[in-house]
Amino acid sequence: MYKQIDANKNRTVLLMGVFLVFVIGLGWLFSYLYNNQIILVVAVLIAFVQALVSYYYSDQISLAVSGAKEAKRKDELTLFRVVENLSITAGIPVPKIYIIEDPSPNAFATGRDPRHASIAVTRGLLDKLNKNELEGVIAHELSHDKNYDIRLMSIVVVLVGTITLLADWALRGMRFGGRDQDKESSNLKAILLVIGLFLALLSPLIAKLIQLAVSRRREFFADASAVKLTRFPEGLARALEKISADKEPLEAANKATAHLYIANPLKNRHDKIGWFANLFNTHPPVEERIKALREME
């Protein structure tokens, strides 16, 4: 179990490092080509402001879009006790608890840190999972809060936004000529222009793939952290089996919120469409997660 947690921490750090190097390299290249050092600075500022708004209000937006309503303790006593007990074990404040009145079993956590966290579960999750399975799911979601996953993904949003803005500006700039108006046309500059055009076209796609890779790694990390809380990997493994096997569509889910859920709520819309489409999944394959859980000791 601890090896799984350490491995996922290392992979996430590596991915974030690649992301940062990519942003810096792209910014330097475009700044050099257009002789404008302010390109990277302005792009980062715009993307940061956009991400900042999302950082502080994304939880409220996600809950509203999902149709989640705050639960009352007297109506959902079992759920409240599970959340409270696991929060004490994890050493974090008890998050706000929300219910989504939907028969499809699923759940998600949101909030920028453990003090501003919320957990939403569907009615289907409460109806179709036993207590051990429910504990596994809640422990997974609490792990997202404890591990500051929402904060991490907010940083990724800043980087993706920066890359997208840089690529857009580069393509626009290429319409009006090169780096400057003198007659300098060295082979190096020609090579860099080709590289710049290539990156301008592909960098948003590359950035999105890195973002999804980070998201998928956080799911593995949250699974491992959940087992650390419950000491019962089979509970979460069986919960994932039930959630993935359920055919009820989650009506409230959409592409903007899909990455939040414990299992891909759009899974039934992407069945049997090949390996290429899997690159754009927000979650790792359930089979891999279950296998990793059952190998934990």
Image (tube, grey):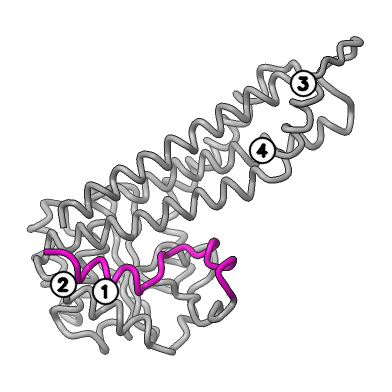
For label 3, the residue is: 34
Q: How many marks?
A: 4
State which quarter of the image contains the N terminus. bottom left
Q: Which quarter of the picture shows residue 200?
A: top right
Q: Residue at x 34, y 54 (%)?
A: 218
For label 4, the residue is: 165
In the image: residue 34, left or right of residue 58: right
Amino acid type, label 2: Phe
User: Going from the N terminus, do you reach mark 1 or mark 4 first?
Assistant: 1
Q: Nearer the viewer, mark 2 or mark 4?
A: 4
Q: Is residue 65 above or below residue 245?
A: above
Magenta span covers which residues?
274-297
105 vs 187, nearest the viewer: 187
User: Going from the N terminus, do you reach mark 1 or mark 3 first?
Assistant: 3
User: Going from the N terminus, do you reach mark 1 or mark 2 first?
Assistant: 1
86 vs 243, nearest the viewer: 243
For label 4, the SS is: helix
